[in-house]
Each structure stands twice: as structure tokens, then as C-alpha cells.
Amino acid sequence: MRVSAETRRKVLEAVDALGFVPKPEAVAKARRGVGRVGVVAPYTSYPSVTRRLNGILHMVSQRPLEIVLFDQESAAQSSSPLLSSLPITGRLDGLIIISLPLDEAIAKRLIDLRLPTVLIDIQHPGFDSVFTSDFTGGQLAASHLVARGYRHFGFLGEEQQSHLYVSPVQRRLAGFRTALTEAGYPLTENNVRFAAYGVGTAFEAAKDLLSMEHRPTAVLASSDTLAAGVLRAAHHLGLAVPDDVAIVGFDDGELAEALGLTTVHQPLEETGRVAVELLLQRLDRPATAREVVLGVELVVRETS
């Protein structure tokens, strides 16, 4: 059931007032020595989130901390993409939120509850965050393809149900488009496609893209999973990779290595480790909000 933002705000205020979630003073007292950290993320949606979680678990493996997982629908697949509810019914020392944009009411609630919170792959004023530059990743892919002599470009990204937030896909496309324009090879809207996350859906979208009369000869996909669909479409159409069409993915997971995909590497596990470090520092002492930007790099393999 959908409710208005005002109704949601009133419900959350009532929940806090009735004690389902302790008031800030009680939380501060009860939290001492609990040793429990909540992690909210769309675990079932993306391999990249699992890798970020692995980084978190690695960091806490030698510490007396318990990790409590809360699975959420991915922002791209939701018509209400902002994180608008938190399943915090037990005591937590802190919270890590992965790849889920915050609703303003939730941000305020976290601040009011004095619950130390670190964001991964997202940013919000007043919160510690660790992320990589999707825009830079798109630029790296474009520069590489131009240097290799490709002149007709395409992009395949994960479609969004809502545009209430700026997604990583949009930032990757923006970086790709900007670098191509600066190089003198602007990306046309006709060469941009979006598909639901998955190899099969990417295959269908890429097959359409690569069947055009003036098809692109190089394609950036917003993830390795979508790039696998592009690679399958190229083979289906009898196109040689990379001679007829080059393909670049994003993330650099096991799939990219297995398929020999050129891809933009993100230090996914490292984002999880850094997030834990930030959270532990915040638990020790108050501090102003910090943003940590980790670098990305292009890994060149057989598809470009």
C-alpha cells in the first residue's frame, strides 16, 4: 500500500513516540556494549552489493561485532526508490546503508535517534559516505575506446522505474557522453538503450541496438551483467568482438574475468572495509561528516 510522505512521517513519529524504536536518550544508554551493526542493502539484486558486504564482514571478522542484515528492493526496480522505512526494531550500535538513496524523513530520523550511520555508494549531507566516481568511470571507458580507434558509440544501462534520484547508471552515462563529446564523437540518443537488470533483457536490448543500419562499433554497458548480454547479442548477430564491435562493462567481477570483458574496476570490497572504519571511528568519538572517494581504473581484456 502506498502512502503519502506526510502520512509516512506521522507514522514514523508515532512509532518512535510509542517506543517501538527507543528515543535518543534511551538508545544512547542501551547501545553501549551491544556490539551490533545493521547493514541495509539490496542484497538479492546485484553481485556488487554482495562484494561490498564481503568487505564489511572481513573487517568485523576479528572484532566482537554482530552484523544484522536487512534486505531491500533495489532503487532502480522500485517506483518509490528512496529509502523511506527502516526495520530497526532492536538495539544497534550503528548502521551501514548500501546503494539506497535516503528519504529526507529517514535522514532526519537517523539523526534524531543519534544512530551512527555510514553510506556506501550514495551521498547525503550530514552523513559519512564512501563511494567511487561513476562519472570518472564513464570517462575512462570513452577515452579508451576513442584511443583504440572506435568512432561510433552506444550505451546500455539498467532502466529505472523512477527518476526521483540520480542513479549510478545516469552518472556513468554522463561521464561517457561528456568524454565522447570532448573528443568530437557525441553520443546520439538513438544509440542509448535501457533494459531491466539481467543478461537476457540486456541481450534483447543489445540485439536491437546492434541491428541498426548505422550501429555502434563500441558499447559501454553500465554493469558486467549487462555487458554479458551485449556480448551474447554480438555473437548471435555474427559480429566479431572486438573487430566489429568493442564492449566495455563496469564493476570488474568474476563474470568479467570469465568472459574476458574489458571493464571499469571498482574497489567494491574496499568500500565495505572503509565504511566499517568510518563507523568505528564515529562510535569512538563525534566527528563532522566525511566523504571518502575511492579510485576506479580500466581493466583491458579481450573485448576492446
Image (cartoon, rainbow, N blue to C red):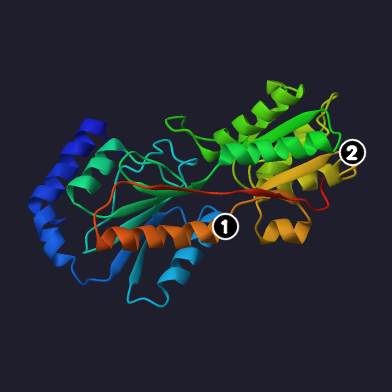
At which x and y percent is residue 271?
49, 56
Mark linked to residue 127: none
Q: Quadrant of the C terminus?
A: top right
Q: Is residue 191 visible?
A: no
Mark linked to residue 244: 2
Q: Give the residue type that dot 1 points to.
A: Pro
At which x and y percent is residue 165?
44, 33
Name the image quarter holding residue 147: top right
Q: Nearer the viewer, residue 99 or 274?
A: 274
Q: Is residue 175 left or right of residue 236?
A: left
The residue that label 1 is drawn on is 47
Q: Give the residue type that dot 2 points to.
A: Asp
- Residue occupying the point 32% across, 64% down: 37
Q: Nearer the viewer, residue 64 or 19?
A: 64
Q: Is residue 229 left or right of residue 149?
A: left
Mark toward the start of the polypeptide (1 vs 2):
1
Q: Residues within 10 Å of mark 1 (few under 14, many from 20)?
A: some
At mark 1, the secondary structure is helix
- Residue occupying the point 63% across, 37% down: 157
Name the image quarter holding residue 36: bottom left
